């Protein structure tokens, strides 16, 4: 091991830029010198042992640096981050430099063994784990305090010295990907493996889920169409539709887990160990010994974290939920008041006033969402989670609960307090369709248009007529650094989650919802793909084995939808007509059916295995081998 | 590895008998010769490489054999079965012979490193995995067919040639254990670690659960007593009691998982891998390659097993459940008929007739239980599960569902069809108390008395006045081979499960149930301990990491009890009086409360981690080390 590190040198003839670092204008020279030295320094001296090159722009100031690494350095980094790759015997194993020869497609001169996004992920990991040793502060910035173990990059970012870090696009690869992904009109699956190797697992998994979910909605949509066409209003058909929906939604969520396991096994992320993740960059604590690995790293008491979660975050979220409900009640009061006002006055002004409450409510909801999102991020960061995944899960859970209430509280109120099915159907349709249109516009088309305009302006500015693939490195960097930043799949999943809510919560009232959802998702795939490829900076790849807390969120939604659908069916006049004498019998029957459906759901979730047998066997085999290896090692040691 | 096996010889000066084998009278000589040769034969020749000695009894026939093994053989066997032991650095690791020096208390001359029950477990495992090679049948018994890979011992047992295999008691150890366990009157915990090292983990875990469960019931009992003493009948107190019960039962089941993890980590069974369990003795299939281990062993298509489960077993169980309900309805009809008859005639004969339906029903239930149990065992065996644990789980599930219905169906009928709360309370009390008394009598006291009489008769017969610890080996074997066989913890858990049902399902009707349960369990600990130590043959130790499917069973019961208690409270006249105008509001309120309670239960189950943090870290550390070892091994190999 040790001698391989010494092969590395900071000089490399074929420097390939992978990641861009942008420093603030006017950053002190001594800071730049210290930072670049730390980046190129040997591992043994606490450096990251990467390559760095300044990018000299036309106006001469050196604020942009390109980071690269030698092939050997990247391979050693792949071992550090625990990358799992396919071996010659088709099994998936953690890559180690010494066993490199046993891996498929490995050759010392094959620089494509690691994909570009993997190389960028490794560099990001190394940069983020560049930690302060004996520095008390960032040289040149006495107010930017450092302590042993503090991530340097994080401190530079929080102090504004570092403006951004982002990976470079590979224009050639991107063009190919765009072509197979959405460049031609075709019916077929997305090139998930290519998306994964360009954008990483998290994003590929999102597109995989979006595609799967769309296919899974098709049966609901197909069954829903005749309800609209033939205007079926029979209760028995509604009951059948709702029952099918409820069972189907359980099945699709269970089957997704299996499909997800197959995909992430192939990508190697199913085997990556969550436990040995390095602490996330924002994590702070006194330097201590990690009890699992025995390595030195910041440690933070889990009891303190629990106290922060349960004594501060949970009450805060509850308060926000209460406030949101309060605002909704005010909205309904305002609406009533506007209606009364219109009834009394019947003027143009009063008919305009009818729209005022809705507009105010929409604006207030948007403001609340933004403030809450900011507060949730602050709180979750303050909870000081050791792992990025745990941070994300807590953030998602917080935002999810609030968004759920904001989106569906008014529908619940209409359905179960006002008992107005017609209004419910109308509100549901309006909400679903407008939110879909607005989302697609605000999320992809608008940024795409802005980006296009920006490129045009840039081209006019540089008097260049080159096509995008012919851009010089300087031009490419200058173009990409101005692109927006993609903040992760959060908002995309949230959109799908809310859509799932519209489709399933009140499915028996509006069977056409699934049709709109399918139509939306088909275009969503294209607009999201466009967004990823043309609008945003390339995001860093993020290995992941599943969609995490979203799985739980979707499952919870499908449990809630059993309850709501049963109540809706119980409230329908057709079902009420079946029990003319006793409302009591009706309620009891509905409750019985609901409990039965819930029981079936849980039995199904229990009976369907989360991983296909094939994957189970492969995982068991790996576990068995690793245990045997432990025995072997002991044998050797004794 | 290889040379260590050659050290073994079938001759050993200090032969210590561990396991007894009893052959049928008149077993052919050639069979005995062949069987004993296979037992002592070298591993390389397909033998078990154990020691065997005939026990010559007074009447001269050689049907009883004692099995032992050399110290070295046992250590190698401990590695084969994957025993986990404590190391010098206090971590728990799989024992391997080559790393033996790193284990706590290991010394080449310390023959107590493995406990006697571990040695017996190893011998049982080796005997059961003595498999046919090229034999077509058991020599001397052409009808007893063999095929490659078939467990010889299993075939001998099914053909009646082998009467029984059982481990010998250690009279000295047993006396000590008895003394600390129940020999003196004291308040305190059971010596679970000593029970574990004498009887194995499964039995120790049962006693641990019994003790924990008893302690956990005490709060319920304490809160229940004033209801009886002050004859509280206020609805609000009942509601409080029921709510406390429901949340408490969730908490105790979650906390048990954590306590169980701590115990089984200490015992090493938490780390034993279920995947690498050898196939259970009854498992059959064509010889193939296990995809996980790569070793040759019988394989059986999992699809075939699924088909057998879903197409045969599940419909059969459903049919039985239907039949059982049908019988219950006949019983209620008969009861009604007897009541009517008594009303009309009012004679001594007619008042006697009142008891007839109950007696008939009790007898029929008992018969149905027995037939069903037999059928369930046959079916589960026919499903051909690879692992003993999987066989047990399927068997338990089958029997559980049927027993649940048999025990509680009549109570459900009384509560929710007849709406007779007084009768419900009366039936509940009668059922609970009589079943407890009958169980303790039939389970422990009766066998104990029979056993005592048997020992007396034997002593009279042999004119011996020795105390039990002074018995000669021949006397001990003759005594023990006539003792009853303990068929596992199944019935003990079932009793606890049904008790939990009586306590929780209708807790708001009869708060005193917990008091009776606590009283019963305190004596149950003593009677079960007596049963284990004095009535039955010593059972083979069975490593286990948790109470398996029973955890699920208890959790399901606690979910069902939320539903039943909510309905009962809703039906109580006090609560009804609160909603004088609208029964509808009552039902809706009850349904709302029920859903809230269920939601709280699930959130609690989700929030409380299954393993204490300390254990989580230890497990993660071991996993990390085994992965590092795999890397190391690869590095060495490349």
Image: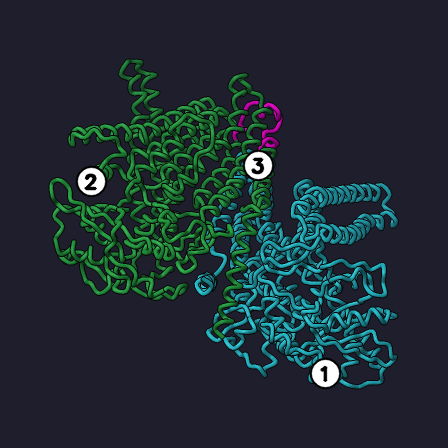
Chain colours: A cyan, B green
Q: Place residue A304 in its image quadrant.
A: top right
Chain under label 2?
A: B
- What residue is disc 1 on? A469
Per the rendered image, the range of residues in magenta is B568-587
Quadrant for the N terminus of chain B in the image: bottom left
Are labels 2 and 1 assigned to the same chain? no
- What residue is disc 2 on? B474
Locate residue B289, reporting x and y percent.
Answer: 35, 66
Whether the residues at callouts 2 and 1 have beta carbons within 8 Å, the answer is no
Q: Is residue A490 left or right of residue B323?
A: right
Q: Is residue B497 left or right of residue A229?
A: left
Disc 3 vs disc 2: which is toward the camera? 2
- What residue is disc 3 on? B594
Number of other residues with Cα within 10 Å of mark 3, as a class: few under 14, some 14 to 19, many 20 or more: some
Identify the main secondary structure in magenta: helix
Residue B585 within the magenta-colored segment of the rendering: yes
Distance between the alpha carbons at the discs numbered 3 and 1: 63 Å
Are labels 3 and 1 assigned to the same chain? no
Q: SS at mark 3?
A: helix
Q: Is residue A316 above or below residue A188?
A: above
Q: SS at mark 2?
A: helix
Distance between the alpha carbons at the discs numbered 2 and 1: 92 Å
Residue beneath the point at 20% across and 46% down: B22
Q: Is residue A388 visible?
A: no
Q: Nearer the viewer, residue B622 or B294?
A: B622
Disc 2 vs disc 1: which is toward the camera? 2
Q: Is residue A336 visible?
A: yes
């Amino acid at each position: 091991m040790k001698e391989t590190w010494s092969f590395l040198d900071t000089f490399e003839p074929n420097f390939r830029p992978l990641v861009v670092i942008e420093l603030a204008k006017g950053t002190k020279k001594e800071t730049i010198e210290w930072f670049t030295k730390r980046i190129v320094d040997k591992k043994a001296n606490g450096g990251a042992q990467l390559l760095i090159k300044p990018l000299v722009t036309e106006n001469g100031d050196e604020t942009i640096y390109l980071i690269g690494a030698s092939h050997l350095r990247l391979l050693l980094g792949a071992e550090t981050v625990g990358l799992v790759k396919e071996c010659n015997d088709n099994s998936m194993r953690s890559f180690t430099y010494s066993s490199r020869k046993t891996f498929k497609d490995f050759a010392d001169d094959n620089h494509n063994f690691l994909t570009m996004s993997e190389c960028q992920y490794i560099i990001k990991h190394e940069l983020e784990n560049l930690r302060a040793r004996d520095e008390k502060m960032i040289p040149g910035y006495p107010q930017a305090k450092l302590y042993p173990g503090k991530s340097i990059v994080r401190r530079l970012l929080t102090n504004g010295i570092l403006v951004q870090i982002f990976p470079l696009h590979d224009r050639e690869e991107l063009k190919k990907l765009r072509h197979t992904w959405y460049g031609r009109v075709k019916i077929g699956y997305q090139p998930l493996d290519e998306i994964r190797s360009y954008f990483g697992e998290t994003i590929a998994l999102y597109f995989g889920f979006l595609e799967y979910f769309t296919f899974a909605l098709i049966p609901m949509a197909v069954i829903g169409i005749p309800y609209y066409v033939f205007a079926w209003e029979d209760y028995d058909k509604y009951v059948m539709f709702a029952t099918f929906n409820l069972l189907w939604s359980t099945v699709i969520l269970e089957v997704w887990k299996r499909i997800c396991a197959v995909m992430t096994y192939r990508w190697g992320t199913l085997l990556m160990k969550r436990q040995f993740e390095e602490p996330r960059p924002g994590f702070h604590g006194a330097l201590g010994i990690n009890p699992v690995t025995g390595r030195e790293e910041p440690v933070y008491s889990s009891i303190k974290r629990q106290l922060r979660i349960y004594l501060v975050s949970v009450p805060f979220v509850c308060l926000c939920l209460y406030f949101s409900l309060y605002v909704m009640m005010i909205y309904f009061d305002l609406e009533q008041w506007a209606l009364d006002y219109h009834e009394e006055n019947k003027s143009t002004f009063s008919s305009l006033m009818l729209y005022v409450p809705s507009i105010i409510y929409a604006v207030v909801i948007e403001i609340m969402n933004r403030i809450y999102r900011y507060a949730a991020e602050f709180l979750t960061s303050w909870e000081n989670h050791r792992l990025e995944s745990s941070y994300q899960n807590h953030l998602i859970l917080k935002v999810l609960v609030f968004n759920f209430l904001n989106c569906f509280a008014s529908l619940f109120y209409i359905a179960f307090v006002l008992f107005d099915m017609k209004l419910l159907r109308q509100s549901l349709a309006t909400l679903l369709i407008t939110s879909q249109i607005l989302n697609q516009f605000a999320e992809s088309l608008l940024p795409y248009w802005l980006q296009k305009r920006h490129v045009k302006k840039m081209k006019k500015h540089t008097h260049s007529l080159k096509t995008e693939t012919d851009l010089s490195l300087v031009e490419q960097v200058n173009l990409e650094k101005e692109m927006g930043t993609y903040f992760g799949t959060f908002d995309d999943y949230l959109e799908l989650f809310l859509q799932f809510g519209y489709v399933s919560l009140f499915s028996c009232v509006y069977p056409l919802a699934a049709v709109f959802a399918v139509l939306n998702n088909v275009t969503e795939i294209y607009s999201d793909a466009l967004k990823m490829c043309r609008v945003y900076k390339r995001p860093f790849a993020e290995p992941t084995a599943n969609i995490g807390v979203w799985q739980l969120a979707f499952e919870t939604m499908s449990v809630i939808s059993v309850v709501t659908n049963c109540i809706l069916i119980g409230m329908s006049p057709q079902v009420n007509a079946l029990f003319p004498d006793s409302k009591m019998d009706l309620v009891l029957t509905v409750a019985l059916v609901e409990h039965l459906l819930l029981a079936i759901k849980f039995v199904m979730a229990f009976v369907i295995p989360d991983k296909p047998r094939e994957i189970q066997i492969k995982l068991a085999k790996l576990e068995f081998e690793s245990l045997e290896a432990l025995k072997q090692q002991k044998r050797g040691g004794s």
